[in-house]
């Protein structure tokens, strides 16, 4: 971990995370090349993001966590400001205002909210004494809900859900008492009909209905799910081989480069490929859990814990959707799906995790 | 101390909770793996065949459309092979880029880009193919062949163009073809539900008869689809193609139409507005069916530019209007033989009965005057003379004595107010005027004067040229007739008019009087006498478009060509055993005898020859 100790400077990094993320990113490029039917421009652009992302991750790992503690508020509020700018001034693509056009590329600030919201909340909560009291619970809850609403307005239910989860993870890990969790969960269940009637757009209701009965509308909203199940199922043990997936290449599989790339992997590399992929994801996840438990102080614990939960829940929601056990929401597969903001945000997250895990302090805070 | 204690509690709580969360996500991971395992291992066979099914395209093979012949087995409409450049819009991301690329080696100058863009988005929406260029040259074909691999969504395929050998002569009668309508596609969807790539399949060169016999006999002409299976690899390249079932070629249609008579009709009409219909008396089949002016059915079938189409649509002569089937014209004096038969059959008159014709008829009820076309009248006039010289006064008098309730049935018997033809496209049945009709349509009671007007085929009486031809045919064949048709249909029933008192002698005299219309020195069509080589019976008509009180008014309206009278004639020959009956209408032609007459003679001449 510290093989450069004798030098005048140290490079902070975690070899397990670095190599597993590097492996995942490389695998991702490989899959993306196939999923985009060998479209070099997509491949090269994504490669650039991977290289920049890995560099960024290393860079972000270097400062002491104290730096992130100090800049937690700033980063969060800048992100919120960017989301608002995107809503009002950003380009409208497919009816959504999620992006800010930077000329060379567009960025999606909401992707960063799922990183900076937990950091911000951790910094807020560690300054409050334990057990966290009602006021210290209410303020984060309101902030989380505000972020969720803001991103829902874009509209982007997938990212909004993830932001909501990232906030809730923090509250849970910070020691929110069980009674409160129980009551909130009960209220949520009871308010489901209300949310269904007043909050969900018709197409979102349709997606949920489709999940429950995909065969009801095989050429409509059930099409995506039906085709992605065919893709995965037809992969078998070892898959059809690189570039041989007929489902993606013959345009049966929708969004094969982005949200549905898992289906391409399933089709071309089979259960074997998926097993390797899942093992890698869970290896990274459990490594992070270990780092969280052994982190030097409460701030670091909370940040590492919540970011790793955000990471694994993104994976679970994406794959759950692709294999037809969760409703279709826009959710990328971390480090693999095409899309700059998504991949960069995870590099940043892991940069922060590594920084917090590798800067040890002897005296506990 | 308490801080350390608090930290200890906090670390323990955090550790417990993060481990709990990890366990939950680990379990979710197992659920995911179980589902993937179920898809890829337990249900592999199902999904493998589903994926195989996806990449196997079942396509329809278009049967070749039947050929249309005339009655002498001359080909009227056939198919000519054409190599078409076809694109699949749903697989094309950038149309402009594609067109630019293709136009570098294939001439696309004729492409109307605005129209094409519309068609493109439409075809893209429904996943249909779209023809970029028809009938590419051999050179273009080769140029595309060497570059074809660059274009995933573009291909060249042999298709057939529907080709009329006489595109102007039969455009209304036989019609033209075009892309299938939504209804057609819906019915095919049910018929061919086993095909998966449905929309694209249907439009693979599929054409449908839009109007005329092409439409009426569409099913007969189009045959049945065959199917072929095409297996494609992951890059959409065809691996194998196998014919599952061969198409059943469309049947050839042998019509009763006569080519020579259409040529005669076309040149005689000289593009004037009107229609000609001729019937073969032996079979009741239509031999000439021509509406003028006309248009090129080939252009309509195989692509016409928007400008050209607009010119046709906006032309005041309305070339698309099928005057033979839908033109509504007063039969005018041509109706007089029917009135005469009514009078004879009901014993209102006989051949000896005569009136003194002063040149007008005065309606006793209100003193209203009905004028004859000839000032001063025809003098002492019997039925024979009344037909030959077309005395209006005589027929006003006869109509005055008629009962409209009975008269209207005779009109119907002679084919008015109902469809004349069994297999004609979009025929207008029009109506026969009667008191109930007038109340309903005009909210006005029936006057005796209305009946008087019917006596000379004016007023509310209207008929289409095809109805007039049927009427001429019934007259010619002395009441025995069949429904008209475009083919020699031997299953048609022979019908007789139900007449009470009319004798064969009466029929012969009607024929004689109609022969005298041409042959007699006072006949209204005596100018036709020397135009022909056989004897023809005829009755002319000049349909007034505006009712006028004086000759001066009349001269004034002549100046406006659109208010001039329609020229009408019905004729049959050769006498005494007629083989063909014909009706001719020339809009604003003014004189039945001198304008419509020569056209009828030309057509009869062509038919009899």
Image: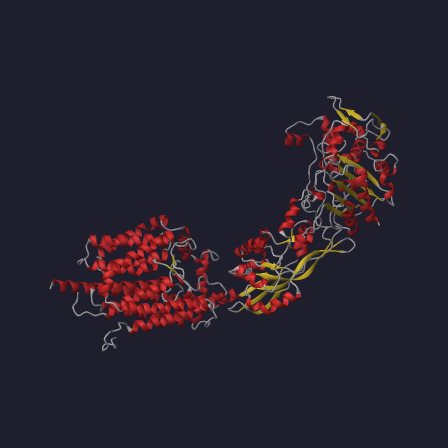
**In the image shown, does A268 or B440 lie closer to the viewer?**
A268
Q: Quadrant of the N terminus of chain B?
A: bottom left
Q: Is residue B291 left or right of residue A4?
A: right
Q: Is residue B341 above or below residue B51?
A: above
Q: Is residue B93 above or below residue A195?
A: below
How many marks can you see?
Answer: 0
Quadrant housing residue B80: bottom right
Q: Say if residue B570 shows up in the picture.
A: no
Q: How is the image coloured?
A: secondary structure
Quadrant housing residue B534: top right
Quadrant housing residue B473: top right
**In the image shown, does B365 or A342 lie closer to the viewer?**
A342
Q: Is residue B21 above or below residue B410?
A: below
Q: Position of residue A8 (x, y in %)?
A: 23, 75
Q: Is residue A72 left or right of residue A25?
A: left
Q: Is residue B236 left or right of residue A48?
A: right
Q: Position of residue A311 (x, y in %)?
A: 32, 64
Residue that appears at 35% across and 68% down: A52
Q: Position of residue B240 (x, y in %)?
A: 57, 70
Q: Say if residue B569 shows up in the picture.
A: yes
Q: Is residue B347 left or right of residue A101?
A: right
Q: Is residue A40 above or below residue A201?
A: below
Q: Position of residue A124 (x, y in %)?
A: 22, 58
**In the image shown, does A275 or A118 lie closer to the viewer?**
A118
């Amino acid at each position: 971990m510290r093989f450069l100790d004798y030098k005048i400077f140290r490079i902070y990094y975690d070899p397990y995370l670095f190599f597993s993320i590097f492996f995942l990113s490389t695998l991702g490029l490989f899959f993306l090349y196939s999923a985009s039917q060998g479209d070099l421009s997509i491949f090269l652009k994504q490669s650039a993001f991977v290289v920049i992302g890995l560099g960024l991750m290393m860079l972000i790992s270097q400062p002491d966590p104290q730096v992130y503690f100090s800049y937690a508020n700033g980063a969060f509020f800048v992100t919120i400001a960017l989301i608002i700018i995107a809503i009002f001034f950003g380009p409208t693509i497919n009816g959504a205002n999620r992006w800010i056009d930077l000329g060379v590329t567009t960025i999606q600030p909401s992707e960063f909210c799922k990183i900076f919201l937990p950091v911000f909340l951790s910094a807020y909560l560690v300054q409050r004494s334990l057990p966290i009291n009602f006021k210290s619970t209410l303020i984060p809850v309101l902030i989380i809900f505000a972020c969720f609403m803001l991103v829902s307005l874009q509209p982007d239910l997938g990212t909004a859900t993830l932001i909501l989860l990232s906030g809730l993870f923090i509250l849970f890990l910070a020691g929110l008492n069980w009674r409160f969790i129980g009551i909130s969960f009960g209220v949520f269940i009871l308010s489901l009909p209300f949310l269904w009637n007043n909050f969900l757009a018709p197409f979102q209701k349709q997606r949920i209905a489709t999940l429950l009965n995909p065969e009801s509308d095989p050429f409509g909203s059930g099409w995506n799910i039906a085709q992605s199940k065919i893709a995965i199922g037809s992969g078998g043990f070892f898959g059809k081989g690189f570039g041989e997936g007929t489902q993606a290449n013959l345009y049966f599989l929708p969004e094969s480069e982005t949200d549905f790339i898992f289906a391409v992997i399933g089709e071309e590399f089979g259960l074997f490929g998926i097993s390797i992929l899942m093992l890698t994801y869970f290896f990274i996840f459990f490594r992070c859990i270990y780092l969280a438990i052994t982190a030097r102080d409460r701030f670091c614990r909370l940040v590492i814990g919540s970011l790793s939960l955000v990471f694994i829940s993104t994976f679970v929601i994406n794959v759950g959707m692709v294999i037809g056990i969760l409703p279709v929401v826009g959710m990328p597969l971390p480090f693999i799906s095409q899309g700059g903001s998504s991949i960069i945000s995870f590099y940043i997250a892991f940069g922060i995790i590594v920084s917090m895990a590798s800067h040890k302090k002897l005296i506990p805070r | 101390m308490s801080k350390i204690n608090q930290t200890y509690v906090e670390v323990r709580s955090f550790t417990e909770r993060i481990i709990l969360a990890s366990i939950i996500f680990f379990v979710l991971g197992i659920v995911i793996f179980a589902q993937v395992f179920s898809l890829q291992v337990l249900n592999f066979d199902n999904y493998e065949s589903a994926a195989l099914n996806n990449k196997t395209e079942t396509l329809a093979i278009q049967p070749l459309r039947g050929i249309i012949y005339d009655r002498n087995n001359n080909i009227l409409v056939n198919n000519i092979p054409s190599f078409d450049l076809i694109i699949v819009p749903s697989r094309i991301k950038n149309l402009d880029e594609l067109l630019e690329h293709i136009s570098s080696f294939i001439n696309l100058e004729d492409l109307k880009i605005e129209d094409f863009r519309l068609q493109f988005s439409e075809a893209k929406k429904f996943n249909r193919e779209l023809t970029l260029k028809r009938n590419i040259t051999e050179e273009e074909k080769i140029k595309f062949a060497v570059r074809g691999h660059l274009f995933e969504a573009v291909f060249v395929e042999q298709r057939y163009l529907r080709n009329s050998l006489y595109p102007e002569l039969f455009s209304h009668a036989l019609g033209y073809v075009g892309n299938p309508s939504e209804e057609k596609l819906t019915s095919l969807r049910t018929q061919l539900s086993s095909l998966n790539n449905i929309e694209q399949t249907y439009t693979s060169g599929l054409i449908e008869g839009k109007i005329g016999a092409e439409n009426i006999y569409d099913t007969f002409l189009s045959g049945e689809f065959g199917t072929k299976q095409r297996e494609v690899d992951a890059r959409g390249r065809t691996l194998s193609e196998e014919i599952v079932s061969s198409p059943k070629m469309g049947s050839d249609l042998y019509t009763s139409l006569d080519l020579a008579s259409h040529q005669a009709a076309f040149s005689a009409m000289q593009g004037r507005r009107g229609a000609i219909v001729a019937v073969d008396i032996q079979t009741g089949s239509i031999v000439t069916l021509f509406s003028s002016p006309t248009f090129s059915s080939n252009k309509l079938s195989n692509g016409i530019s928007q400008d050209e189409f607009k010119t046709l649509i906006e032309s005041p002569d309305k070339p698309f209007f099928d005057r033979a089937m839908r033109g509504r014209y007063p039969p005018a004096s041509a109706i007089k033989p029917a009135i005469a038969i009514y009078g004879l059959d009901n014993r209102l008159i006989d051949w000896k009965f005569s009136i003194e014709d002063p040149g007008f008829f005065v309606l006793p009820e209100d003193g209203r005057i009905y004028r004859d076309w000839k000032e001063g009248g025809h003098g002492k006039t019997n039925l024979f003379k009344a037909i030959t010289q077309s005395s209006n006064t005589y027929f006003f008098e006869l109509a005055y004595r008629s009962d409209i309730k009975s008269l209207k049935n005779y009109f119907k018997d002679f084919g008015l107010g109902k469809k004349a033809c069994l297999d004609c496209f979009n025929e207008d049945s029009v109506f026969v005027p009667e008191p109930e009709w007038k109340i309903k349509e005009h909210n006005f009671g029936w006057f005796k004067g209305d009946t008087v007007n019917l006596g000379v085929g004016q007023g509310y009486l209207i008929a289409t040229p095809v109805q007039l031809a049927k009427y001429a045919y019934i007259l010619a064949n002395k009441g025995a007739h069949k429904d008209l048709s475009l083919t020699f249909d031997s299953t048609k029933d022979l019908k007789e008019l139900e007449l009470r008192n009319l004798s064969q002698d009466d029929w012969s005299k009607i024929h004689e009087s109609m022969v005298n219309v041409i042959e007699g020195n006072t006949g209204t069509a005596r100018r036709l006498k020397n135009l022909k080589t056989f004897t023809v019976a005829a009755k002319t008509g000049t349909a007034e478009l505006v009712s006028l009180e004086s000759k001066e008014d009349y001269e004034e309206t002549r100046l406006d060509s659109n208010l001039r009278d329609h020229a009408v004639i019905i004729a049959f020959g050769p006498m005494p055993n007629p083989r063909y009956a014909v009706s001719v209408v020339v809009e604003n032609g003014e004189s039945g005898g001198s304008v419509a007459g020569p056209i009828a003679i030309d057509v009869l001449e062509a038919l009899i020859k």
